[in-house]
Amino acid sequence: MLPYKNIIELDRKAATPLFLQLTNELVKLIQNGQLTPNTKLPSSRTFADIFQLNRNTVTKSLEELEALGWVIIKPKKGTFVVDTFPIIKPNDWLATKSNRLNKAKPTFEFYDFPELKKPIAYTFPLGFDDGLPDVRLAPIDDLARGYARNIRQLAFETDLNYKDGFGNLELRKQLVKMLNETRGLNISTDHILITRGTVMAIHLAIASSIQKGDIVAVGETNYKTADMVIRHFGGQIVRIPVDDKGLQVAEIAKLCERQPIRSVYVTSHHHHPTTVTLSPERRMELVRLANKYNFVILEDDYDYDLHYGNSPVLPLASGDQSGRVLYFGSFTKMIAPAFRVGYLVGPPRLIQALPKLRRIFDRQGDTVLEKTIADLLKDGTIRRHLKKSWRHYKERRDLCCALLKKELGDWVEFEKPTGGMAVWVKFDERINIPKLSQKMIAQGVYLANGTTYNPDGQQLNSIRMGFASMNLGEIERCVLILKREINKMK
């Protein structure tokens, strides 16, 4: 008799009834050849003893197997696997169990997307992340009440069906109002598409504007997700130097004189990862070059609202008169990464076409969440939240920079960022950042390993150190732990 107890696992906490679990497991044994045609199964009493089940549960399982056509129950003789299945050479039962527990690899070949990287999951309670918001500041109660209200209202109005893929109309109206008032844009709802965060906007913008072999100019250091999407669609990346005034636009002009380019990707307000702001002069020149050389500007304005000095510089999209700038942002930095609501602004003709492309991988966004965000924009909740967050983040930036200078001034160099949620820090060459990262993680504090933003063939020995997700006490604690671990490495 097969060692049923070792090769069948029943989960008494699962939602699936035990009789059905036993049925499914026996079907698998028949399918993979462990139970061959005409094999007699143990009696219901024996099965009940093996798995410590009620006998009625086993009887119900065997009856289910017969109803499904896998076995035949012969009165006074027992239960037998039917004889109409082909004989399959059985696998060793230990191997079968091991494969199931270890989720055996598929036996077919598949494309593993070598040009892409696995996303980072931030699971540490403390640490210098890539520049994330503090979710403890998010207006969760307002969101919860709004979501509950909207799901009931939309259900009552039978408005929870498929949509057109453009996103909630009310949210588009509120975003048009916000972007026109705060960013100097001059758009209508025909210019905007709601996405699931900035990453989807980047994907749609690149997929609709770049073909295999097209040249795309990006910063020498750049947002890695954008790099991955460009490569995935066959774009050829050309690196442009970045200095304290942002992307060196003069180098783009030289590139255009040598060869045609299709687009330029730029994080204009706070360059990712270095946090520098693209100067107004370079913004104007970049738009002029786009018109002259017929390329598209992909403007990622991921944290426009977090500027701590003078008024923020208006985005390139505000000075675009020819529809060459695709502009995108999201509520991730405003609220929390889990709220996947973003937007893409572009010429109406393109926006009208994008839902067709979107439908390949995503039918529509979260209708209820989009309506809730629209309500919070309309009643001023998000505006008030941004003001509160701005005060906290500015205070945290100031403390983080002061502590880095005081405690680690001999080991790090940085410029105090004018905005955003992270500091770009260069470590002394004597510091091995990957080893330091391991030591910090061992202390329960996240620190990047220093390889993420290295250009090909270069070692910058620099990392983004996010400060916004920690309160003042947490920042001080993490800097002191960092100091201690650096001193151990000296």
Image (spheres, rainbow, N blue to C red):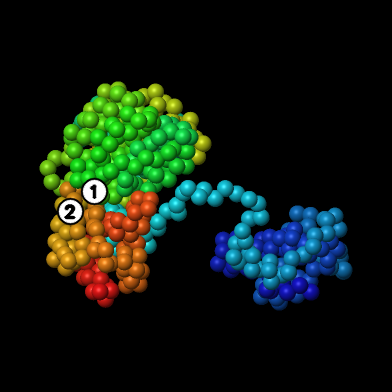
Provide residue 318's location: percent of width, then percent of height. 23, 30
Residue at the image position 32 percent from the left and 51 percent from the top: 336
Choose the circle earlier in sequence order: 2 or 1. 1
For disc 1, the marked residue is 275
Q: Is residue 47 above or below residue 332?
A: below
Judged from the image, the secondary structure of the residue bearing numbered disc 2 is: loop
Nearest the viewer among 41 and 418 is 418
Judged from the image, the secondary structure of the residue bearing numbered disc 1 is: loop
Residue 20 is drawn in which quadrant? bottom right
Q: Are marks 2 and 1 in contact (CB under 8 Å)?
A: yes
Residue at the image position 83 percent from the left and 66 percent from the top: 39
**Label at residue 408:** none
Residue at the image position 62 percent from the left and 61 percent from the top: 104
Give the quadrant of the N terminus. Answer: bottom right
For disc 2, the marked residue is 415
Q: Is residue 392 visible?
A: no
Nearest the viewer among 38 and 54 is 38
Residue at the image position 71 percent from the left and 67 percent from the top: 58
Provide residue 394's location: percent of width, then percent of height. 16, 53
User: Label 2: few (<14), some or many (≥20) within 10 Å?
Assistant: some
